Amino acid sequence: MGTLAAFIINSVLLGVGLAMDAFSVSMANGLNASRTSPGERSSKGYLLAIPLTFAFFQFLMPMIGWFCVHAIEEAFTAFQKAIPWIALALLTFIGGKMLIEGLRGGDAPEAAAALSPGVLMMQGVATSIDALSVGFTIAEYRAAQAFAASLIIAGVTFVICVAGLRIGQRFGTRLAGKASILGGMILIAIGIEIFVKGMLGG
């Protein structure tokens, strides 16, 4: 029982650490979502699609990493060097679009449309790609254990992202037209933070 408890605690803590970038991006999305009417937010599935997307990728990436460690370790080690660059490029691109739109003073429907399924998928990849490295952390796990750990990480990510989304919506209502600008700046800052950590090996 002690081993099981340690496994769960370690997986939860790992999930919390990995979910911080997704939490920040969820807040940025919440800022943008706050500019639409309640009906529009509901029809676009903001309160569910965003955390579900991030949770899915936080589940998928550790599993891919685990598989790569066991199947193609040399190629995976080489690919790791590109992870900070990919995250920086994706988040800077998405954040830059939000920032430009906010500076142009786009109206609420246009801002809401910016979070298309494609953009949300890009955010999911950008905020979870560093979780590929978790494959090394859980390399000693059997397949079932790796699957369970990834599920726990996904569950933690979902809860944290729901909280981030709601926080962003609440503050976004107060920020009104500045929400898109702030959201874009947050995404760019996260991209830079991931890049710097990756380059410094942190």
Image: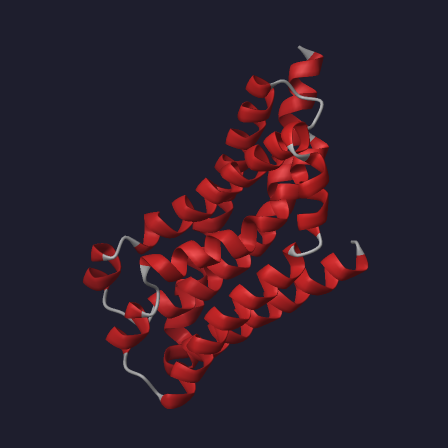
Q: Is residue 69 left or right of residue 60?
A: right
When asked about the image quadrant of residue 69, the answer is top right
In percent of width and height, residue 168 lies at 44, 63
175, above or below 30, in the image: below
Q: Is residue 198 left or right of residue 118?
A: right
Return the residue nearer the eye: 18 or 96: 96
Q: Quadrant of the N terminus?
A: top right
Location of the C terminus (image quadrant): bottom right
Residue 181 on image: x %, y % = 46, 79
The front one of 56 and 66 is 66
Q: Residue at x 23, y 55 (%)?
A: 42
Question: Percent from the top left, x then y, of residue 130?
Answer: 63, 49
**Residue at (20% x, 56% y) in the render:** 43
**What residue is drawn where x is 28% and y is 82%?**
107
Q: Quadrant of residue 172?
A: bottom left
Q: Which residue is pictured at 32% across the width and 55% down the height?
A: 46
Count of picture labels? 0
Query: Is 179 situated above or below 55?
Result: below
Q: Nearer the viewer, residue 72 or 16?
A: 72
Which residue is farthest top? 1
Above or below residue 178? Residue 194 is above
Of 146 and 72, which appears nearest the observer? 72
